Amino acid sequence: MTPITRQEVLGLYRKIFRIAKKWQSASGQMEETTKEKQYIINEAKTLFHKNKKLTDPDLIKQCIEECKARVEIGLHYRIPYPRPIHLPPMGLAHQQSRALRHQEKLRKLSKPVYLKSHDEIS
């Protein structure tokens, strides 16, 4: 990892913890705020530790872009959880049909950048 990339990653890590420290839930309830703060901290720790050993510059860039997208979306909508994706039409095709394989390909292609690692850890 280059020194510039390392600085960027560490800066994002610190930014996420600053956000978690100041986080207020949209509902304004204290228990919701506490749950959301804890979710932000746990999610950051899990993903950053999982990707700690990455050496491929392209994969590191993808992870940085995902992190930035999730932070911006979370701040904009005031929801720390990943936003659901829209399933393409015919998303619930019959199990035996050819359309199912095609729908699986479409789902993989339509996954947004901010959800790339979400399925891996949940």
Image (cartoon, rainbow, N blue to C red):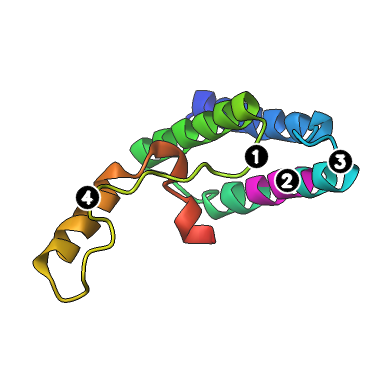
Q: What residue lies at 49% left-to-right and 52% top-to-bottom?
A: 118
Q: Residue 93: percent from the left, percent from the top?
A: 22, 64
Residue named by callout 3: 29
Q: Which residue is mark 2?
A: 41
Label 1 to label 2: alpha-carbon separation: 10 Å
Frontmost residue, 32 versus 113: 32
> Which label sits on residue 106?
4
Specify the segment rendered in magenta. 37-44
Disc 2 and disc 4 in contact, CB within 8 angstroms:
no
Q: Is residue 32 magenta?
A: no
Q: Callout 2: helix, strand or loop?
A: helix
- Mark 1 or mark 3, which is nearer to you? 3
Q: Residues within 10 Å of mark 1 (few under 14, many from 20)?
A: many
Q: CA distance from mark 2 to mark 4?
A: 32 Å
Which badge, 1 or 4, comes first in the chain's sequence?
1
**Which part of the image, by quadrant, shows the C terminus?**
bottom right
Q: CA distance from mark 4 to mark 3?
A: 39 Å
Q: CA distance from mark 1 to mark 4?
A: 26 Å
Q: Nearer the viewer, mark 2 or mark 3?
A: 3
